[in-house]
C-alpha cells in the first residue's frame, strides 16, 4: 500500500521545532497572537531573556494576556551594555545547542535579538519579524542591532514596503523577503473588550480627550542630560499652553536619570502600566508624545495625534499616514508640533501603514514552508 505523501508532509510540519526569543514589552505584546499559532502548529520553545526585568515591563503581559509561561528564562545581566550583550549570546548559545531548533524567530531590534549571532554560527535558520526598519541614526543601539540581525537572517518579515526596499538596497535578495504587515492590529482587536473594561481613567481621575500621554526612554534621549532637559521643558510649555494634565508612565531607565531634574508642574509621573490600562489611556488621550517606535503605530490605529520627540524615525509610513509629526528635541518645536497635529480633526486610515490585520497567519504560513 502506498503511503499518503500529504500525511508525511503534515507530520513533518508538526515536528518542526521553532524557538522564539524575546525579552521586552513591545516584543511580548506583538508576538502574543503569534505564540498561540506556533504552539498549535510546531514544537515551540519559548525563551524570555528578561531584558526588561521588572514586572510592569515583562511578566504582567503574560498574566493579563493569558500567554503561557516561557520554557526558559535567561535572566540576562543588564548591569551594563557589554555584560548584557555577552550574556544574551552565551546563554542563547547554550539553549540553541540543547534544543536544536529548526528555526529561531526574533521580533525587533533589542539586545535579545542578538541571539541571532550564535544561531547563525550553528547553522540554524533565522526568521526576523520587523525586519528592514532603518532610522539611519548611528547613535541608536537598536539601529546597529537591526542591520546585524537582518544580514544574519534566513527569511525577513518586514511590516511595510518601505522596510522591504531598505533590505533590497542592502543587497538582501528579494526571495528572502515577505511583507506581512504589523502584528499590533490583531493584538489590539483581540484584546479590545478587555481594554474597554480598564478603569485606569477613573483611577487617575482623567476625562476623555483632556490629557496628554507621554513616554520617553530611548538611550540617546534620556542618557543625554541636555536632551532630557529639553524634553521636560517642552512638556512644561505644553502643560501651560493647553492647560491639560500630562500623564507620564515612566520607564525605570528614565527614572534612574531624573534624580537631579526638577519635574515641572502639571506632569504626573506614574509607574509603567499593563497593556490594557496603557491602551485605554492611548485610546482616550488628547495627544500622545513619545520617543517610542511602537506607540505611533498604536496611536494611528486609535486615530490619536502623536508627536515623536526624536530627530529620526524608522517608521516614515506613520508620518505619511498623517497622524504623526517628528518634532526633534527643541522644546519650542515640540510645542509647535503638538499645536499642529492637534489642530485638525483626526481622519487617518491605518490599513496602508499597518497592513491588513492578518500578520500572524501569514507568519505561520511562511514558517511552515521551506526556508532556504
Image (cartoon, rainbow, N blue to C red):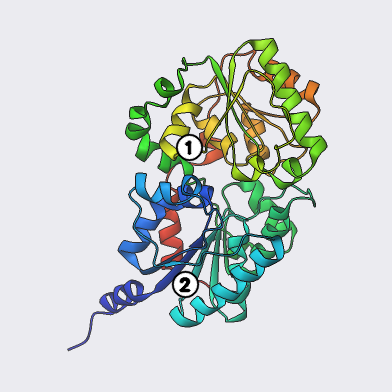
Q: Quadrant of the N terminus?
A: bottom left
State the image quarter where residue 337 is shown.
top right
Looking at marks 1 and 2 on the same chain, the residue that comes earlier in the sequence is marked by 1
Q: Residues within 10 Å of mark 2 (few under 14, many from 20)?
A: few
State the image quarter where residue 171 is shown.
bottom right
Question: In x, y percent, where is residue 130?
Answer: 58, 53
* Numbered-mark total: 2
Label 1, label 2: how far apart the Cα atoms are: 40 Å
Q: Label 1, secondary structure: give it.
A: loop
Judge whether residue 172 can be spotted in this image. no
What residue appears at the point 33 percent right and 49 percent down from the top-left corner? 66
Which of labels 1 and 2 is toward the front? 1
Between 311 and 152, the one lying in front of the other is 311
Between 316 and 270, the one lying in front of the other is 270
Find the residue positioned furthest to the front: 260
Question: In x, y percent, where is residue 133?
Answer: 66, 50
Q: Label 2, secondary structure: give it.
A: loop
Find the residue positioned furthest to the left: 1
Q: Residues within 10 Å of mark 1 (few under 14, many from 20)?
A: some
User: Residue beneath label 1, please?
Assistant: 273
Q: Quadrant of the C terminus?
A: bottom right
What residue appears at the point 33 percent right and 28 percent down from the top-left corner? 197
Judge whether residue 336 can be spotted in this image. yes
Between 134 and 191, the one lying in front of the other is 191
Q: Is residue 237 above or below residue 262?
A: above
Question: In x, y percent, where is residue 70?
Answer: 40, 62
User: Residue beneath label 2, please?
Assistant: 370
Residue 9's disc number: none
What residue appears at the point 63 percent right and 16 percent down from the top-left corner? 342
Find the residue positioned furthest to the bottom: 1
Q: Viewed as shown, does residue 357 lie left or right of 63? A: right
Question: In x, y percent, where is residue 265?
Answer: 66, 18
Amino acid at each position: 500500500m502506498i503511503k499518503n505523501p500529504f500525511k508525511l508532509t503534515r507530520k513533518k510540519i508538526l515536528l518542526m521545532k521553532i524557538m522564539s526569543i524575546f525579552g521586552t514589552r513591545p516584543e511580548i505584546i506583538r508576538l502574543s497572537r503569534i505564540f498561540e499559532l506556533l504552539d498549535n502548529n510546531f514544537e515551540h520553545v519559548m525563551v524570555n531573556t528578561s531584558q526588561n526585568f521588572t514586572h510592569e515591563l515583562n511578566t504582567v503581559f503574560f498574566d493579563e494576556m493569558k500567554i503561557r509561561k516561557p520554557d526558559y528564562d535567561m535572566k540576562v545581566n543588564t548591569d551594563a551594555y557589554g555584560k548584557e550583550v555577552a550574556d544574551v549570546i552565551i546563554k542563547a548559545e547554550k539553549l540553541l545547542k540543547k534544543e536544536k531548533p529548526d528555526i529561531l524567530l526574533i521580533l525587533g531590534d533589542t539586545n535579545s535579538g542578538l541571539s541571532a549571532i550564535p544561531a547563525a554560527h550553528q547553522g540554524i535558520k533565522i526568521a526576523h519579524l520587523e525586519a528592514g526598519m532603518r532610522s539611519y541614526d548611528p547613535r541608536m543601539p537598536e539601529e546597529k542591532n537591526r542591520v546585524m540581525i537582518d544580514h544574519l537572517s534566513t527569511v525577513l518579515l518586514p511590516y511595510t514596503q518601505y522596510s522591504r526596499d531598505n533590505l533590497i538596497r542592502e543587497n538582501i535578495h528579494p526571495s528572502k523577503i515577505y511583507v506581512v504587515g504589523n502584528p499590533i492590529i490583531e493584538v489590539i482587536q483581540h484584546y479590545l473588550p478587555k481594554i474597554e473594561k480598564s478603569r485606569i481613567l477613573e483611577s487617575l481621575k482623567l476625562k476623555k480627550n483632556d490629557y496628554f500621554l507621554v513616554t520617553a526612554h530611548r538611550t540617546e534621549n534620556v542618557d543625554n542630560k541636555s536632551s532630557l532637559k529639553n524634553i521636560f521643558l517642552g512638556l512644561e510649555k505644553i502643560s501651560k499652553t493647553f492647560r491639560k494634565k500630562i500623564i507620564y508612565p515612566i520607564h525605570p531607565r528614565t527614572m534612574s536619570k531624573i534624580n537631579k531634574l526638577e519635574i515641572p508642574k502639571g506632569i504626573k509621573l506614574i509607574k509603567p502600566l499593563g497593556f490594557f490600562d496603557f491602551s485605554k489611556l492611548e485610546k482616550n488621550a488628547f495627544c500622545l508624545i513619545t520617543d517610542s517606535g511602537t506607540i505611533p503605530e498604536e496611536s494611528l490605529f486609535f486615530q490619536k495625534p502623536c508627536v515623536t520627540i526624536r530627530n529620526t524615525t524608522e517608521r516614515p509610513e506613520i508620518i505619511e499616514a498623517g497622524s504623526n509629526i517628528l518634532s526633534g528635541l527643541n522644546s519650542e518645536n515640540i510645542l509647535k508640533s503638538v499645536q499642529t497635529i492637534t489642530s485638525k480633526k483626526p481622519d487617518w486610515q491605518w490599513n496602508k501603514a499597518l497592513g491588513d490585520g492578518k500578520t500572524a497567519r501569514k507568519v505561520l504560513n511562511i514558517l511552515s514552508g521551506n526556508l532556504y
